[in-house]
Amino acid sequence: MARDVQKIVLRGADDHDLTKLAEYEALGGYKALAKARAMTPEQVTDELITSELRGRGGAFFPTGRKWSFVPPKDKLPKPHYLVVNADESEPGSFKDNEIMARVPHRFIEGCLITAHAIDSEHVFVYIRGEYSGPYEILVGALEELRNRTDIRGDVTIVVHRGAGAYICGEETALMESLEGRRGNPRIKPPFPAVSGVFGMPTTINNVETLIAAAPILLNGAEWYKKMSLSSPKSTGTKLYSVCGNVQRPGTYEVVMGFPFKEFLYDLCGGPLHGRKFKAVIPGGASVPIQNMEEAEATLMDYEGFVAGGSMLGSGGVIVIDDAQPMVTVIARLARFFAHESCGQCTQCREGTAWTTKILERIRDGEGTVEDLDTLLDIGEQMTGKTICVLSDSCAVPVVSGIKKFRGEFEALIQGKRFHPVTAAVA
Amino acid sequence: MAEKKMVNLTIEGRPVSVVEGTTILEAAKTAGILIPHYCYHPGLPIAGVCRMCLVEVEKAPKLAPSCATTVAEGQVVRVYSDKSLDARKGVLEMLLINHPLDCPICDQSGECELQDYTYQEGREDSRYREPKRFNPAEDFGGDVIYVPNRCILCTRCVRFMDDVAHEPTLNVSERGDRALIGKFEGKDLTHPWAANVVDLCPVGALLSKDFLNKARAWELDRTASICPNCTQGCNVIMETRENQLVRMRPRPNENVNAFFMCDWGRLNYRWMNEKNRVEHPMVRGKNGLAASDWEAAISAAARALNGKKVFVAASPMLSNESLYLLTQLMQGGSGAFRVTEGEEAPLPGVEDLALRRERAANVYGAEKLGFNKTKDLLGGLGLGDVLVIAGEDLAGIDASSVARAGDVIVIGSILPEAAGKASVVLPIANYSEEEGTVTNLRGRVQRFTQAKQAPGETRPSWLVLGDLLGAIGKQTNFFLPSEVFAQLASSNSSFAGLSYDSLGFKGLPLVDAPPTSPKAPIAVAAR
């Protein structure tokens, strides 16, 4: 299956130290940038539109189209800003960490290509505060470019470290934070393309999205588009960070449409000895939980995960085996969202905490049958009604968990404790 | 100015036409529909956080926050659809899960939007079975106490201090369900306009120390009036309980005070409850001043006047009507007034709104009607003149300077010590006890109305002066203050064309007042 695990984003990183400018250049680094700069910004954007690259932050919005939304400077005479969302905080997701730590120059090349495409000279990389390793590497890589004006051009890249709030991964909260304010999501409109960071037209992209711009420019949109095993709407490769109860956790890059079953059992080595997979959360904490029946039938792309009862999200695969009590897992997820809610919107502020309290009560054997209906109803109230989707994200694992693993909830409510050992052996 | 484009839409089946850029919430108001809301306030930037104003917009995938969604041509809005009602019911339940439900001891009870909307659209019970969040009450400085357990985090108070007072003092501290309103270190709500946060708070989280535990909302009688405490003329509501003024709150007027009033004006109402009142007419007899009846007192005053030159020492708290009638008494004499001064304190977020230096309601009206503004109140009093002291307390004035007067008539609510030799005392209602108009510093004439009853045999000043004018043979026949105003309007060109009806409760500028622009509501997208 080597064909299918073709590496684009992480190409060369296994055999070379691509944190070094010399090694990256020896591998053809920054050639895509030169190629892009020989083109007009519109041509670069068109190439991206043709490639059908879609945003890897979780929303899968077509990247080229997003770039095209920035109003031209003759219509809106303001500087354009490029913001890179490197505030990767989704539980289970650590792919951007891998990118920045292993291929920082390719990432910077992607940033510079994008800056050219949107006619921007200002790039802000908002990096998760806890990512001190990748931060050092990224700053080191930028340091190497200090005197390379042939590469940097007129572009200034600012790396800004977050201060530990998950909500600052939401693009408008990130901008508030970048501006020095409390990281609360903004109401839209105005959209970032018109009024983003510091009130300027802004394009904001995920790390993994931008890095794809380099290979796309180098090899052409058609080459990229062909990399798809299932739906023609999902093109290229995707990075997955795998964690949980699995033999070989880590970051994997596979072509869109790769079979999830093969991914879990072959690439990741299957379950731990003596255990069985019970559930998978395939896209980071905020996507619906899949049972194994759904997971094993899934083809790994945007459409495939939706068909499989979940979402691709950020590609943070959390594998849960039969030794784990689902209620505990879900209660823990809910507690995360309750802790990270910014508290602006009523449903999120109160709903995430209320959900957590009920789940923890059920977990502790104090639940009632009515609690499940209440949880589902709170979940409904938390979905699609708030400024950002953190509220929805909390409801998703809870609602899908109750729907798919109701038996475990009911057993706890009826006073049967979950015995991991018995469960694993049974 | 370019013609503003109108947008047509349907809200709950009613056709609505509003200016482009209007929000659905404001558009609904024009159709007589108040969409429930908490964080939205027309005088503050939009936050869109309470999610209470969610409505269904046809063809939109999600419910829309009506405070932050602008109208679109042909839009069909459903405020009371099942989906909208369900969403708002959900918000109300969430807002109440950690709320202490302590309405019986809460000052806001009866005027609480959480109560109102819960009764209107909320659930009859709660499904919450967990322990409630608790945070202790905190003194926010100034006149404000914060009770976090009742707070719904609408952030109106934070936005007022940031965007209207321009003095960031409050913030949202912590996050998630631990969030609460906090004060920046070393800061207190001591800004001269800070107490507006108490009015802005839709629930019982921010309370006035002054009003704390004084009255239940339903025990209050409310009267539309004008703040008498400076020349700005902020529109207010005077609230009384058992004939005692207990609170003054701002009444919106986009031409004067937007939605706000200053702390000084707000808290300076006790003088209108003054207890040392003259309650009966008095006439000087052999044994000094003695209680009399009105008829005898008016006759005595008329006799004292008897064609003599009159000097009027008036209070700038008197209405245009009373001041006008006083000018008719002068008989070739003159009138003067003095005014207490203090420091000017503007509210930066609203154009031309400040606690003004001159601390009386009708300084401009008094000047307009020919009274001389002076520091030496009795400087114009000629030897042997009849001194009419109208509403003036003569504080700080020595009895010897009154001695120059040939005779003294007191028309007031108290008997000034320095007016000891007065031959007649005619007790009048104070500012809160009668009706009239005052003219603010921009020449806006505004009506104030009677908020409480005057004690004893006290009468409204315009009535007393009318009777007195009648007694000295001037034709007067006033049964209502509006009639006095009508005569003023027909005799003084500045007031021409104005009437109580046309003034309404928002007032109108004098004919010769300089033009002012309305204070545009601040409600635009935040930042």
Image (spheres, coloured by chain):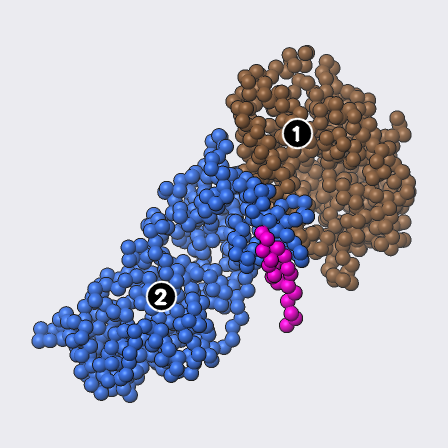
Chain colours: A brown, B blue
**Three-letter code for the amino acid on which mark 2 is drawn:** Thr
> Is B279 drawn above or below residue A254 in the view shown?
below
In the depicted structure, whether residue B501 falls above or below residue A194: below
User: In front: A180, or A40?
Assistant: A40
Q: Residue at x 54, y 24 (%)?
A: A369
| Rendering coords of residue A154 (x, y %) | 80, 55
Label 2 marks a residue whose chain is: B
A316 lies left or right of B359: right
Residue at horizontal 52 percent and vertical 66 percent from the top: B519
* Chain ID at mark 1: A
Is B112 on the left or on the right of B374, as rendered? right
Badge number at residue B449: 2
Q: Position of residue A94 (x, y in %)?
A: 73, 33
In x, y percent, where is residue B123? 49, 38
Few, some or many C-alpha atoms within 10 Å of disc 1 (few <14, some 14-19, many ≥20)? many
In the figure, residue B271 lies in which quadrant?
bottom left
The residue carrying mark 1 is A400
- The quadrant of the rendering that contains the C terminus of chain A is top right
The question of residue B7 being in magenta is answered with yes
Secondary structure beneath disc 2?
loop
